[in-house]
Image (cartoon, rainbow, N blue to C red):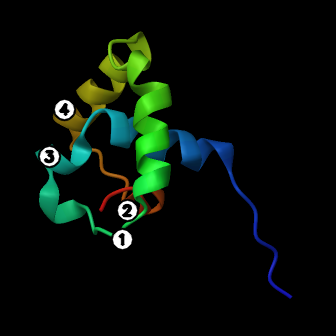
């Protein structure tokens, strides 16, 4: 039997990358899978955090260190 768990840390990274529109910046790093309902739910409920300190820091990490996370968030886009 395979134990499946959801790790809130990886979920948070996926949400952050979705609301900062990571796909538009780095389209070659995002594989589209087609989960419109989940993506729309995340955008509608978390976009209000776009200007938060956390997002600003995360954008600096991406810009300065070329940070990329290519696991969880690939399922958000269609």
Mark 3 or mark 2, earlier in chain: 3
Q: Which residue is drawn at the image coordinates 14% and 64% (left, top)?
A: 28
Q: Which residue is drawn at the image coordinates 29% and 31% (left, top)?
A: 61
How crowded is the residue under tag 3: few (<14 C-alpha within 10 Å), some, or many (20+)? few
Mark 4 or mark 1, earlier in chain: 1
Alpha-carbon span between mark 2 and mark 1: 7 Å
Secondary structure at badge 2 equals helix
Secondary structure at badge 1 equals loop
- Can you identify the residue that label 2 sits on? 74
Query: Are dots 2 and 1 in contact, CB under 8 Å?
Result: yes
- Can you identify the residue that label 1 sits on? 33
Mark 2 or mark 1, earlier in chain: 1
Q: Which quarter of the rendered picture does the N terminus lie within? A: bottom right
Alpha-carbon span between mark 3 and mark 2: 13 Å
Secondary structure at badge 3 equals helix
Mark 3 or mark 4, earlier in chain: 3
How crowded is the residue under tag 2: few (<14 C-alpha within 10 Å), some, or many (20+)? many
- Can you identify the residue that label 3 sits on? 24
Judged from this view, the residue extending furthest toward the front is: 37
Residue 58 placement, left or right of 46: left
Residue 44 placement, left or right of 25: right
Q: In front here: 31 or 45? A: 45
- Can you identify the residue that label 4 sits on? 64
Mark 3 or mark 1, earlier in chain: 3
């Amino acid at each position: 039997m395979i134990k499946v768990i959801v790790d809130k840390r990886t979920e948070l990274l996926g949400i952050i990358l979705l609301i900062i529109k990571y796909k538009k910046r780095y389209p070659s790093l995002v594989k589209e899978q087609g989960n419109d309902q989940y993506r729309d739910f995340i955008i509608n409920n978390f976009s209000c955090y776009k200007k938060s300190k956390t997002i600003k820091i995360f954008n600096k990490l991406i810009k300065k260190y070329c940070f990329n996370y290519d696991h969880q968030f690939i399922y958000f886009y269609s």
